[in-house]
Image (cartoon, grey):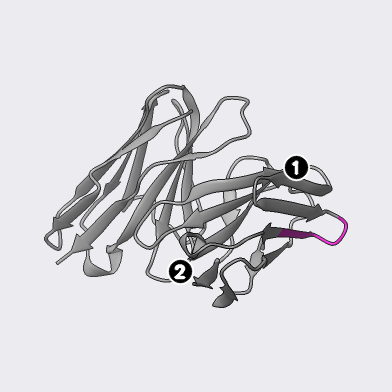
Amino acid sequence: GAVVSQHPSWVICKSGTSVKIECRSLDFQATTMFWYRQFPKQSLMLMATSNEGSKATYEQGVEKDKFLINHASLTLSTLTVTSAHPEDSSFYICSAREGGGYGYTFGSGTRLTVV
Amino acid sequence: QKEVEQNSGPLSVPEGAIASLNCTYSDRGSQSFFWYRQYSGKSPELIMSIYSNGDKEDGRFTAQLNKASQYVSLLIRDSQPSDSATYLCAVNNQAGTALIFGKGTTLSVSS
């Protein structure tokens, strides 16, 4: 079945620094990738949708200059949290969908802690 | 605003019983519906997907969809302690692109 690899699985960074999270589709071409954020005991909140080669579409309330998304190839999307602050600490999960497909494959998630 | 509503629970059932999880959604244009299971600290894993009105069965799981009532449910038969998790209902948006998640229902199966 479809596999999405997400790295790192966890990261601790200092306040003010930037962190990059990678999401790779291993055995299919991901036309569309999605980035979610999940706070403790909350549901997954969609942050942005990205199509290969296009600018990401951000959900209302998500700062596009703070959460930089790059989807330069059909197998790789990255999320960079710039100038991270403690309130950005969360569980970030990517999801990918193959072109024309109905299924969504999720990465294993990245636990970000900003200290 | 598009919404997916679930009872947060916890829903507690004894081992071997049937667990019934419910979900309502607001976007009448939604066409795809999913149930995910999420263990604490882990990513969601797909349990069932359903696209047409009626029932869809897969092993101990049955998904039910009623588009007129904007309602989707998940039944878990012969519940096991290993089924204890948070169950997330997800609905695609009208554009058919992203998934919108409910807050999840926490299920606890006691042995």
Q: Position of residue A86 (x, y in %)?
A: 22, 68
- The residue that disc 2 covers is A42
- Crowding at mark 2 (Cα within 10 Å: few <14, some 14-19, many 20+): few
Residue that extends furthest to the right in the rendered view of this protein: B68
At horizontal 22% and vertical 65% (from top left) the residue drawn is A85
Residue that extends furthest to the left in the rendered view of this protein: A14
Q: Is residue A86 shown left or right of residue B49?
A: left
User: On screen, B6 above or below B41?
Assistant: below
Query: To which quarter of the image does residue B73 belong?
Result: bottom right
Tell me, for residue A11, which label it has, or none: none
Judged from the image, the secondary structure of the residue bearing numbered disc 1 is loop
Q: Which residues are magenta?
A: B68-73
Is-magenta flag for residue B79?
Answer: no
The C terminus of chain A is located in which quarter?
bottom left
Q: Position of residue A26 (x, y in %)?
A: 37, 25
Q: Nearer the viewer, residue A82 or A105?
A: A105
Q: Amino acid at mark 2?
A: Gln
- Crowding at mark 1 (Cα within 10 Å: few <14, some 14-19, many 20+): some
Chain letter of disc 1 in the image? B
- The residue that disc 1 covers is B51
Q: Amino acid at mark 1?
A: Tyr
Query: To which quarter of the image does residue B59 belong?
Result: top right
At horizontal 65% and vertical 51% (from top left) the residue drawn is B60
User: On screen, B66 above or below A115?
Assistant: above
Q: Nearer the viewer, residue A29 or B10?
A: B10
* Residue B106 appears in the picture as rendered: yes
Chain letter of disc 2 in the image? A
At horizontal 58% and vertical 45% (from top left) the residue drawn is B98
